[in-house]
Amino acid sequence: MTSHWIDMIHADVAMVMGSNVVENHPVAAKWLARAKERGSLILNVDPRYTRTSSFADHYCQFRSGTDVAFVNGMINYALEHDYIQREYVVNYTNASFIINPDIGFHDGLFSGYDEAKRKYDAATWQYEMGADGMPLRDLTLQHPRCVYQLMKRHFSRYDVDTVCSITGAPREDYLKICRNYTSTWAPDRVGTWLYAMGTTQHTNGTQNIRTYAILQLLLGNVGLAGGGVNALRGESNVQGSTDFGLLFHILPGYNPSPLAAEQGLAAYNAANTPTSKDPKSANWWGNRPKYVVSMLKAWYGDHATAANDFGYDFLPKRDGDYSHISLFEAMYEGRIQGLILLGQNPAVGGPNSLKERAALEKLEWMVAVDLWQTETSTFWRRPGTDPASVQTEVFLLPACSSVEKEGSVINSGRWAQWRYKALEPVGESASDLWILDSLFKKLRAEYAQGGALPEAITKLNWDYGTPEQPDRHQEPDVHRVAREINGYFTRDTTIDDKGTPKSFKKGDQVPGFPMLQADGSTASGNWLYCNSYTGPEPKDNKLARRDGKDAANEIGLYPNWAWSWPMNRRILYNRASVDPAGRPWNPKKWVIRWNETEKKWEGDVPDGPWPPGEKHPFIMRADGHAALWAATLKDGPLPEFYEPLESPQHNLMSSVQVNPAIKLWHKSNPELNPVGEEATYPIIGTTYRVSEHWQAGAMTRNLPWLAELVPDAFVEMSQALANQRGIVNGDRVQVVTARGAMDVYALVTNRFQPFRVDGRLVHEVGVVWHFGWEGIVKGDSANVLTSHVGDANTMIPEYKAFLCDVRKITGGVA
Amino acid sequence: MNAMLIDSTRCVGCRACQIACKSWNELPSEKTQFFAGKGYQNPKDLSATTWTLITYNETKRRGRFDWVFGKRQCMHCLLPACATACPVTALKKTPEGPVVYDSSICLGCRYCQLACPFDVPRFEWDKVFTKITKCTMCADRVAEGMEPACCKACPTDAIVFGERSKLLAEAHARIDANPLNYVHHVFGEKEMGGTCVLHLSDVPHQELGHAGGLSEEPASAYSRPAMASIPFVLTGLGIGLGAVSWVVNRRQQLAAQQKEIERLHEIAEQAEGKEPGGTNS
């Protein structure tokens, strides 16, 4: 989230799209309820009428996978009616920037496309540069190649009729959404945009989010109280997992993981450190070398020296894509020997899960660390499999739950909160930290005997207070971990702090990331968390703060409750909440403001200390401006609509049917990733969760009370489709795709309605994916239906739109 | 007197209340299959192990499709028919609000079940000596100054606990502030003489699963004779004992029940007599 949970109460309009916030984040409904009480309007867009729709003031249905068309139409509505916050757009976004003369767009493709490689060369998407090395701009927004004019041309194709024909949204409902949401263009009206996996899990996932960001920027809604582009995280600590680089393409703190071509720290820094000639650009990522070196110092300690590039060579270098789908494709081909899973259950949660379950059989060994026996840990005895035929050696390490250990959790609003141990771990279960610490000790002993690049392990700086031989009763000191994440000085150091020299002793905690250095004098496990634990004692742990006093602006920031990155800033991009003179756009709910007398900012921690107007507000961008136009993406600088990989409808916008930059796995091995056609699979399918179960279900299908509420997997469908197929509520039916089939109960409901798409009726059904063969209540996962295909930029699987058929099971026992 | 205000316009149907009730009262789960009612409802009905139940109702509101959620539980009447019907005063209205019961003296006669206009009391049919069970408004928590478990768990403040007169005023204030968003009827304000559970809704209360066509007269005014006229249609040990008890203690009980009715009227008058205060949300 660019803001935080409480901040929703300040929204004049809240849009929920690609999220079923009320069902999947029920506690968040508290804040939406308060917003409603204050007169906010809640809008909800979803293929079916959910508990969120019931809560909302206006609901509009639309077909799964047509998000880009839907919001592009809203952007067009805003541009057409000039419902934009012009001063914000001109000063804070790249609307005025002029693009390369060779930029082009024709029939669904931007310039630079290589069809054979399914890749774009983004050279023509770049800014046109002036002689001074700065991008050319036209602040009147008239230049035909300025971003604003390119946008007007691009989005004008998304008129209301076209959008409604693609999405199946009823025209009046659609216009109501457009009118209400774009009303937040006024400087003192704010809209928040809430989204989740309904947005990301598409082949157009990144562009779906881009449409939100573009609209929010045009309306001037980013950085203000009650605004923002807010990802509601699907797991209680998934924010922590991305912050700490548990993804193949990043290191902790969102630094790119090194590529094979980036040999040596200098090459890495050159490739990944942006530069700017604009004196008003803070270009914060220009500090990247400091953060990477500090991380290497934390990891390799005294073994990290300037002479050895601070241990950069110890880091693995990647060559391509190691995302979930790619890993399982490689596993299926027998190219992966072993797998360690911590709290993951791909046999239920992975796409095309029949294939992924089969892929697990190709492993020599697998270790599952989990609270329960999950379907992944028992893939060898799944229904229809003879355990004797599976050679994989499987270990289950029992993990204790979050209340049985001390540590931190980071919520969607970037609040890092300390938690305490309430109970002793059950049975032989242990904390993740103990398990990893013990595993490391064993690995280090093994690598001391030799192996491939043993230094990567043997030279690690690893001291969390446990003995060399793991002791079941000696828990690693989690405070040592937290202090290392914050970072410390590795030698006595004096730093020039805005003209004042500041001295630190070796071992002192670093007070904040502006102090981190690229010379090895500082260590920090994650620069973003530098400032979270600023002294040697547990009392210096800011994550543990529990002071409920609000900040001076009284907008619910509660700055001394826990801690949020970066630097305890509660609302990101808050320099955009004020005009260029430092006056809040919305004085009633100001986030920061400039105190002219005292020459300082008040309110939230500002995005940098500079006085108003001295720096552009979007400090993480090299040009300092928010990107309406994004030249860094793989599938185009502006969002363009393409159909999902499987769709009953040809693309009405162009002859390019699917995202031209996605990897098509089925082209190389069609029998393993079959793609269904409308003739056999005429119905759109989507997958989702319910309030009563959690993710792959291990934590809820093992609890009798929750099992009682939702005991079986089910498919939801409209009355019209049920009539057509002779199905009544409660029937057993089979849902089938080109990849798999599952037997489920049919829930026939008016909450699903067919869509009128391009003049004809199209049906959609939804299946819950929580179930598997373990637990008190059992069933199969909807992921036996889904496909191995991912977003062009992130490789997040397209769980949310596919083609299927639904057949009544007759004659057999359900 | 304590009461609960349940505003279905704030309810998101998450069922945290249903789980919190089972958790606090240590009630076992029931064996269910698919869904037993409309929408996601489970189990089928209130039972000895399910004291509160969320209902899922597809309906029309102001001409548009809507999906609304109701909460069923004991209404904790001001003048509870169950208490007056109980031959052994196992059920009792407390001055704090909850209608509680002492299962150690319950005979299992089911008069309370027959008497209840809201169809609430349930019996533990799986036990040899069946006893009444139902929502107690978490009288044990309330006695310790806490709110009922369902109330505590509700993420959207759809359930509010507090002084009845204040909650009644709050309920009317909400209707007045948003006249288009509510039906202009606080269910429980007058039904059967008034209850300590008050419901607000944006659709007719019956669509949420609440009983319709109820008198404004307290059931207790006529439930005693009504109960007395019910022949012993029920069989089994409980009823046998109940009949014995009935005969032996008849005179004693009549006196006790008369006393109980008087006491209930007193409590009700106290509750009604209080001036509506500010909001309690």
Image: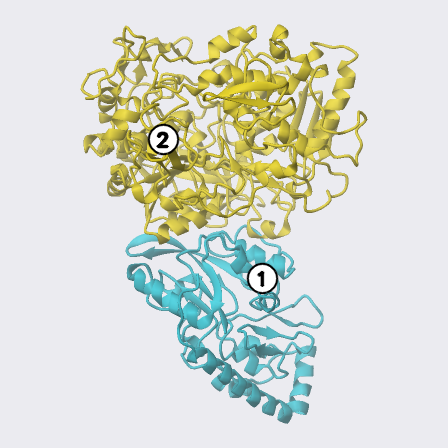
**Viewer-proximal residue, A775 or A478?**
A478
Identify the secondary structure beneath mark 1. loop
Colour of chain B, in one word, is cyan
Q: Mark 2, residues whose alpha carbon is within 10 Å: few (<14), some, or many (≥20)?
A: many
**Viewer-proximal residue, A503 or A376?**
A503
**Viewer-proximal residue, B243 or A175?**
A175
Identify the secondary structure beneath mark 2. helix
Q: Amino acid at mark 1?
A: Thr
**Viewer-proximal residue, A811 or B202?**
B202
- The structure's colour scheme is by chain
Q: Is residue A365 left or right of residue B152?
A: right
Residue B275 sits in quarter: bottom left
- Asked if residue A381 can be seen in this view, the reply is no
Q: Residue furthest bottom?
A: B251
Compared with A161, A294 (above or below) is above
Q: Chain of mark 2?
A: A
Residue at screen point 25% across, 28% down? A158
Task: Indicate the quadrant containing the C terminus of chain A: top left, top right, bottom left or bottom right.
Answer: top right
Gap between marks 2 and 1 measured at Cα: 53 Å
Q: Is residue A459 left or right of residue A105?
A: right
Compared with B3, A121 (above or below) is above
Compared with B93, A643 (above or below) is above
Colour of chain A, in one word, is yellow
- Asked if residue A772 can be seen in this view, the reply is yes
Residue at screen point 43% across, 72% down? B165
Q: Mark 1, residues whose alpha carbon is within 10 Å: few (<14), some, or many (≥20)?
A: many
- The residue tagged 1 is B50
- The residue tagged 2 is A575
